Amino acid sequence: MEFMMSSDRSSIVVSKNESDYFEYPFAASLHVDADAVERCTSQWVRRLRLATDKRALSRIKAANVAYLAAWVFPSANLQTLQLASDFTAVLFLLDDAYDEGRLSADPQAVAKLNERYLGELFGYIEADTDDPLTRGLINIRDRIRMDHPHFLLNRWLSHFQYYYEANLWEANNRQQQRVPEVAEYIMMRRYSGAVYPYCDLIELLLEQPLPLEVVQHPLLQSIREICNDILCWTNDYFSLDKELRSGEVHNLIVVLRSNDGLTLEQAIARLRRMHDDRVAEYQSVKEKVLSSWSSAGIRQYLDATDAMIAGHQRWALAALRYAELGGLVAHAG
């Protein structure tokens, strides 16, 4: 890997090649309907007027949101895959609004907006349909509510609430120009990455939802937590160039460099070792899960987490999500 560093952010280059891929003891596969779902998501974004200018639409297209859904949910039925793709589109819009827009270092504005968005999603207040992101999120919520058990929706909403709270934590850090501690960052990254709501969607791939005593068992919780860490840390790796350019501190490599006095190359090497240790731990926990339960549903769930981990990297390597396209996708509020 080659790095060029100077005071001019435009000169920062993080080039990646095949030798930089992360290795997994399981394969990735792509859903056969990725192209059809991509077209439907583009139509959905236009129909709900979620991104109203050409630059925003270009960034959504570059993100390849349907391909992310198709790589991480290769066994989903078409309805679930479309739901995941549309959710990914509105989540990217929301991410960019919180991370890059006027909200990024304004915790008071973030707290106020969080209160409104969560009130709308939980049904405590009437939804402001003039806000494009509200239209998208309410649409996703209503589709989950219409077609699936209410307990699944409630779990998804609870995990999505943590995503909003993590955005507030990030805004406070930016305002204070604070780099978080490593342990704190790892914990909060699990929520800012919004991976847990995707783990909830895994249950839509099963013939029957897992019973509470299984889905909340410490072993299954560990599977989701490790899966979350792997996805978020690899996301930090692939988005490093973008975040170095913008001065963003919420990246594990940047946090390791700052806290441990490492060079950028040393911090990247540290992340890779941490990642590989986490993959080994994931394999060990999977064996314990399979020795505790042998049902087809459990095996299907673990196959789905395997696919999510391996598929996320395949999407990240191909997507233009982190290319310099300029501008913001959307404004929240």
Image: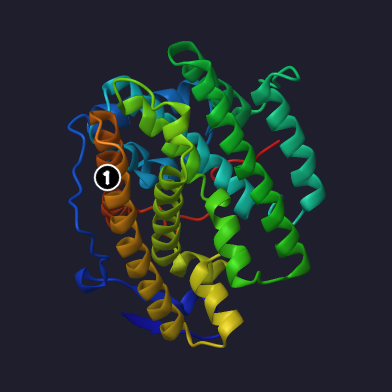
Amino acid type of disc 1? Answer: Ser
- Counting from the top left corner in percent of width and height, residue 84 is at 39, 31
- Counting from the top left corner in percent of width and height, residue 164 is at 65, 42
Q: Is residue 123 above or below residue 50?
A: above
Q: Is residue 220 above or below residue 283?
A: above
Q: In which quadrant of the rendered view does residue 209 lie?
A: top left
- Counting from the top left corner in percent of width and height, residue 74 is at 24, 36
Residue indicated by mark 1 = 291
User: What crowding class fits label 1: few (fewer than 14 Cα within 10 Å), some (14-19), or many (20 or more)?
Assistant: few
Task: Tell which of 292 and 152 is nearer to you.
Answer: 292
Quarter of the rendering occupied by the N terminus: bottom left
- Counting from the top left corner in percent of width and height, residue 152 is at 49, 24
Task: Tell which of 50 and 277 is nearer to you.
Answer: 277
Instruction: Indicate left or right for 173 with 183 as reference.
Output: right
Is residue 42 shown to the viewer in this render?
Answer: no
Is residue 234 shown to the viewer in this render?
Answer: yes
Q: Residue at x 39, y 27 (%)?
A: 210
Task: Tell which of 34 and 305 is nearer to you.
Answer: 305
